[in-house]
Amino acid sequence: GRLMVGQRTLNPFIGVRIPAGQQNCCSLEELGERDEDPTLGVGLAALLVEARQVRAATVRLHQGIGGTVREFSKVSPTVWRSKKFRSLQSRDAKFIYQYLLSCPHGNSAGCFDLHPMYACADLDMTEIEYRNGIDSLVSAGLVEVDSAENTVLITNWLTFNQPANPKHAIGLLNQMEQASSESLKAKVFHELR
């Protein structure tokens, strides 16, 4: 979902990321208004249309593989004091864990399908960096992964994200059911009991 514009990276979800030292981020709508801005060095109308198409395609993709993209995610600040989290030696592993807690592929069950290449693209990591980070998270007991099904289960997710009401619990079960790994889904179901 990123497009290069000279030395700048266009991300259809957050706008334009300007090189370090310049704090001129903007939304896609603001970007359209700045189409003729000489500091950008190139007309962005065509790129703006393409970015919107990428964003729409990504939303359609997420809708096709497990519902709509979440608009927010609850992440407890206690994660920073967690012995398991603090035991991680790699910044990549910590970054991946924060990503898993809040990524658009996730759901309210904490058990979801995530192909490593999607994560690598989102995190701007190589597959080796991602797999090493995931291995660290598994070793620390923060996640479980079914590699054959590309399913991730965030350990203790429901401790911090209990269903608020019966309707929410039904939605959680429906989202959990969309995950491919039967063994990881069974663990979530057991935790719900």
Image: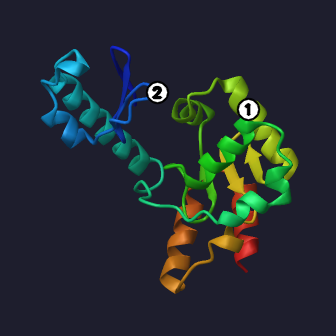
State whether residue 56 is above or below residue 132. Answer: below
Q: Amino acid at mark 1?
A: Arg
Q: To which quarter of the image does residue 139 belong?
A: top right
State whether residue 125 is above or below residue 72. Answer: above
Q: Position of residue 23 (x, y in %)?
A: 38, 36
Give the image's coloring scheme: rainbow
Q: Position of residue 10 (x, y in %)?
A: 34, 28
Q: Residues within 10 Å of mark 2 (few under 14, many from 20)?
A: few
User: Which residue is denoted by mark 2 in the rendering?
Assistant: 20
State whether residue 84 is above or below residue 124. Answer: below
For the C terminus, the image quarter is bottom right
Compared across the picture, whether 98 is left or right of 9 comes to right
Q: Amino acid at mark 2?
A: Ala
Q: To which quarter of the image does residue 30 belong?
A: top left
Compared across the picture, whether 161 is left or right of 167 comes to right
Give the residue drawn at x 66%, y 42%.
95
Q: Secondary structure at mark 1?
A: helix
Compared across the picture, whether 63 is left or right of 27 comes to right
Nearest the viewer among 68 and 16 is 16
Give the residue drawn at x 72%, y 24%.
128
Q: Position of residue 93 (x, y in %)?
A: 74, 40
Res 171 visible = yes
Nearest the viewer among 95 and 61 is 95
Q: Position of residue 5 (x, y in %)?
A: 31, 18
User: Which residue is denoted by mark 1 in the rendering?
Assistant: 131
Give the residue drawn at x 46%, y 27%.
20
